[in-house]
Image: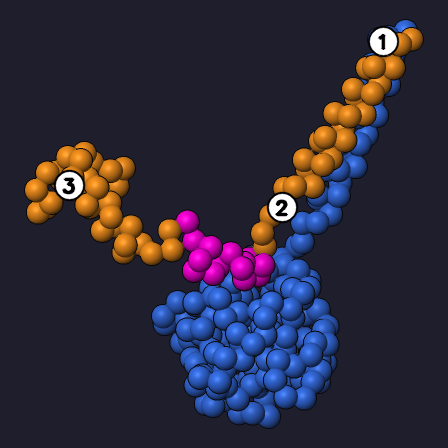
């Protein structure tokens, strides 16, 4: 009896967790992008600065970033 | 005993998931297309006296344009639409814009720099796009004199205005 109670509670809690989890999923509709479209909401708010920093990093480290690029070391490529 | 209990729990779980799935399906809005009646609306004007009611333009060909200040192609389309409006007969044609900015001040700032001669309604809560089933921004609807959607135009690229103008002209010239 006690075991069935535990199973019952576990089922209810799993369902509750599923419901709470599902409520967290939201699709942003095309007309709801107001805040997301803000410049400061971008993953990279300044692409030019990011490119320059990337260039400096791979030049100094003689390693290539994910974005690619030839050479390394002198920073002249 | 325990197996029976598990079966009941499983059935209940499945029932709950089915209800969830039904709720999700219910939220999927169907996009309106050519031949569908345009949903009626009455919204406050973005500037000036309101409200703006689609019904007040019945008898005219209407270009209903959904726009927002955060949407670059929308901003590109507004001056082009204004130029086109000036070339169309006012008694037969009307542009009605629906602004979807949460902060109308941003839209007003843009309109101050790029004034247009057609009304913009403000739909801050974004209820009307759902009724139309918008799939992208901007989207515009060509509505005939009887309130039926004749064309859905999604996005705005350079050169689109030519197609838009010719479609509107066809409808304006097809007098009732």
Colour scheme: by chain
Nearest to the observer: residue B110 or residue B23: B110
Q: Secondary structure at mark 2?
A: loop
Q: Which residue is mark 1?
A: A3
Instruction: Give the CA separation, mark 1 to mark 2.
Output: 37 Å
Label 1 neighbourhood size at 10 Å, few (<14), some (14-19), many (20+)?
Answer: few
Dot 2 and dot 3 within a common chain: yes
Q: Nearer the viewer, residue B120 or B62?
A: B120
* Horizontal relation, residue B24 to residue B7: left or right: left
For disc 3, the marked residue is: A59
Query: Which residue, given by chain and number where applicable, does mark 2 sit on?
Result: A26
Q: Label 2 marks which chain's residue?
A: A
Q: Which residues are magenta?
A: A30-43
Q: State which tag comes first along the sequence, 1 or 2.
A: 1
User: Which quadrant holds residue B24?
Assistant: top right
Question: Residue A11, image x and y in percent?
Answer: 79, 21
| Quadrant for the N terminus of chain B in the image | top right
The quadrant of the image that shows the C terminus of chain B is bottom right
Q: Which chain is blue?
A: B
Q: SS of the residue at dot 1? A: helix
Q: Position of residue A27 (x, y in %)?
A: 60, 48
Tag 3 or tag 1, which sits nearer the N-term? 1
């Amino acid at each position: 009896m006690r075991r069935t109670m535990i199973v019952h509670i576990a089922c209810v809690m799993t369902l509750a967790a599923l419901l709470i989890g599902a409520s967290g999923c939201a699709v942003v509709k095309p007309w709801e992008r107001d805040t997301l479209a803000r410049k400061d909401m971008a993953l990279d708010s300044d692409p030019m600065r990011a490119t320059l920093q990337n260039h400096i990093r791979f030049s100094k480290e003689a390693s290539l970033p994910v974005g690619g690029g030839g050479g390394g070391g002198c920073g002249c490529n | 005993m325990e197996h029976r209990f598990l079966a009941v729990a499983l059935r209940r779980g499945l029932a709950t998931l089915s209800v969830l799935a039904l709720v999700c399906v219910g939220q999927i809005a169907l996009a309106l297309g050519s031949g569908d009646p345009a949903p009626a609306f009455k919204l406050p004007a973005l500037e000036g006296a309101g409200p703006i009611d689609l019904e007040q333009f019945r008898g005219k060909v209407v270009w209903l344009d959904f726009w927002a200040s955060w949407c670059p192609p929308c901003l590109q389309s507004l001056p082009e639409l204004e130029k086109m409006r000036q070339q169309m007969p006012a008694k037969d044609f009307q542009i009605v814009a629906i602004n979807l900015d949460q902060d109308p001040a941003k839209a007003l700032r843009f309109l101050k720099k790029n004034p247009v001669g057609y009304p913009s309604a403000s739909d801050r809560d974004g209820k009307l796009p759902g009724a139309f089933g918008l799939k992208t921004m901007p989207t515009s609807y060509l509505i005939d004199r009887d309130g039926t959607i004749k064309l859905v135009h999604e996005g705005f690229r350079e050169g689109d205005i030519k197609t838009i103008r010719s479609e509107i002209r066809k409808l304006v010239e097809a007098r009732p």
